[in-house]
Amino acid sequence: MSVDHLAPLGVLGTEESWERLDEFHPDGTNLWSPDAPIALGWHPYTRSSLWRCAQCSGAFLRYTEYGGYYVEERIRPLLADLIVNP
C-alpha cells in the first residue's frame, strides 16, 4: 500500500499513555493478526496516529516500531468491527 495519499488527522495517545506497553489479545491473537482487536487504550494504539485516505476515504492507524536495530512503520485499517473497549 502506498501511503502518499494519506492525510494525518491526529494522534490517539498522550505522553502518559505512551508508557503503557501491554497489548490486548483475549483470544490469542497477536499484533500481526488481521482479526486482532483494536483496543485504543492499549499498545500500540496509544502511540498511533489516525490517517485518512484521499482516494477511498478509509481510516488507517499508523505506528512506528522502534526495535533495537530497526525502525519499522506499521499501518492498519481502522475497522469498526474490531474496535473494542475492554
Image (cartoon, rainbow, N blue to C red):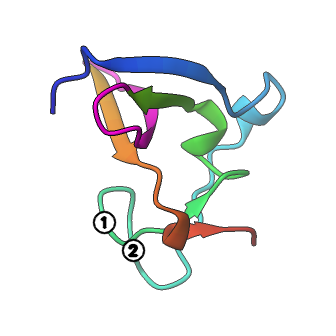
Q: Which mark is residue 29?
A: 2
Q: Is residue 81 above or below residue 58?
A: below
Res 65 seen here: yes
Q: Position of residue 69 (x, y in %)?
A: 26, 18
The Cα atoms of the two marked residues, 1 and 2, are separated by 6 Å
Quarter of the image with the N terminus in it: top left
Q: Is residue 62 left or right of residue 9?
A: left
Q: Position of residue 2 (x, y in %)?
A: 16, 24
Callout 2 amino acid: Thr
Residue that appears at 29% across and 18% down = 5
Q: Which residues are magenta?
A: 54-70
User: Marks 2 and 1: in contact by CB < 8 Å?
Assistant: yes
Looking at this view, is 35 or 17 the one in front?
35
Q: Which corner quadrant of the image does residue 63 belong to?
A: top left
Report if residue 57 lies within the magenta region. Answer: yes
Q: Is residue 76 above or below residue 14?
A: below
Name the secondary structure under disc 2: loop
Q: Which residue is the extreme one toward the right?
A: 16
Looking at this view, is 7 or 57 the one in front?
57
Looking at this view, is 64 or 54 the one in front?
54
Q: Which residue is mark 1?
A: 33
Q: Residues within 10 Å of mark 1 (few under 14, many from 20)?
A: few
Q: Which residue is the extreme one toward the bottom?
A: 27
Res 63 seen here: no
Residue that appears at 44% across and 17% down = 7
